[in-house]
Image (tube, rainbow, N blue to C red):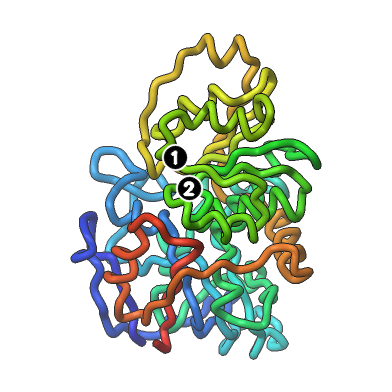
Amino acid sequence: MIAVQVTGYGGVEKLEIVDIPIPEPKEHEVLVKVKACAINNTEIWMREGAYGKDTKSGWRPEGVQFPRTPGSDITGTVVKAGSAVNEGMLGRDVVLFPFTSSGGTGTEHIAEDMSFIGSEYDGGYAEYVAWPADLCFDMPLSGYMESAVFSVSGLTAWHMLEQLQVKPGETIMVTGANGGVGSLNVQIASKVLGAKVIAIVGDLELEGEMKELGAAHVLSYRSADLAKEIVGVNGGPIDSVADVVGDALFPASLEVLKKGGKFCTSGSAGGQKTELDFRTLYLKHITFYGSVLGTREEFRRMLSAISAGRIKPVIDRTFPLQEAREAQEYFKQSGKLGKVVLLPEG
């Protein structure tokens, strides 16, 4: 089969197209013919070494073992079943839950042995992938491409908002609102949870699209005084912040939060290190959450909301699998709206 492998830490030149054997599913696994694989920051940061220390990067302390096939937002068709898997799985169109762990219900994402597809396992930048049968769920939508954009971004967004305990009528600021996680934060917060969303983007030409996703207000991070604008459109401080940007918007985020407000981060595309005046934290009684991925039950709830039409796929552009380098470079450009998707069959 054709696959794209990361051969080591570095730039996109570390992505190589290879011809390798089709994986054989183990006893409790199925073989999935990949139909679509959306791109996430996580596989780019894995390649660049952004998650690790001392030249190691990945979800596990030992770092990624190269070569590795990346890709975690995967949909496809089950074409072969392991010896312990019910053959009724054959022919099912599935979306893959993106990691394994020994954690019990509700703690899967924080188990020490959490291992991610595309990092600790070979992933979806390939024509086929083997994965545990119990981590393959029915696609929420009829289209492979449309169903592929939710697994990592959607689960991350859903878990962020459950941690923040967003309530109807509350105001939440969403940073990076035009990105994969951000655009889903906007939809889930507004259309599932009933909150008022202030979406932060770079280009205000996206205002119409963001309001269609459910944003009440759309502001640019390029504003000369963003914090003042946020408080102004809301008529006062806000309840919570769902952040994927990090340092660049951290001071403004804390400034606009009300006393007792909540801040949740799942990314740091705008800077991985920041400064914090602890007085702001304790004098305003702010609660911080670190967040990534989520639980299987949250995944099921998200898929149900997608199937019901409450959350819609937002796709910016597609690329054939063989153009993975170009796709990752495009993904890092600003001004996109939604996900970038690789299609193995071009």
Residue 196, how many percent across, how many down?
Answer: 71, 43
Q: Would you name the residue on which mark 1 appears?
A: 221
Which residue lies under the disc numbered 2? 201
The answer to whether mark 2 and mark 1 are in CB contact below 8 A is yes
Horizontal relation, residue 115 to residue 44: left or right: right
Q: Crowding near pointer 2: few (<14 within 10 Å), some, many (20+)?
A: many
> Circle 1 sits in a helix, a strand or a loop, which is it?
loop
Query: At numbered mark 2, what does the secondary structure look like: helix, strand or loop?
Result: strand
Does residue 60 lie above or below 228 as drawn?
Answer: below
In which image quadrant can residue 328 be found? bottom left
Query: Where does the C terminus fall, quadrant-wise?
Result: bottom left
The amino acid type found where label 2 is placed reads Val
User: In terms of image quadrants, where is residue 259?
Assistant: top right
Instruction: Pick whichever, 131 or 245, lies toward us.
Output: 245
Is residue 299 visible in the rendered image? The answer is: yes
Q: Earlier in the sequence, mark 2 or mark 1?
A: 2
Left or right: 198 as drawn, with respect to 279: right
Decide: is 210 above or below 341. above
The residue shown at (62%, 50%) is: 185
Image location (x, y in percent) of residue 104: 69, 48
Residue ID at (32%, 65%): 330
Between residue 257 and residue 41, name the one nearer to us. 257
The answer to whether residue 256 is above or below residue 52 is above
Q: Residue at x 54, y 54 (%)?
A: 207
- Asked whether residue 120 appears in the rendered view, the answer is no
Mark 1 neighbour class, 10 Å CA radius: few under 14, some 14 to 19, many 20 or more: many
Q: Position of residue 135 (x, y in %)?
A: 63, 67
- Distance (Cα) linking label 2 and label 1: 6 Å
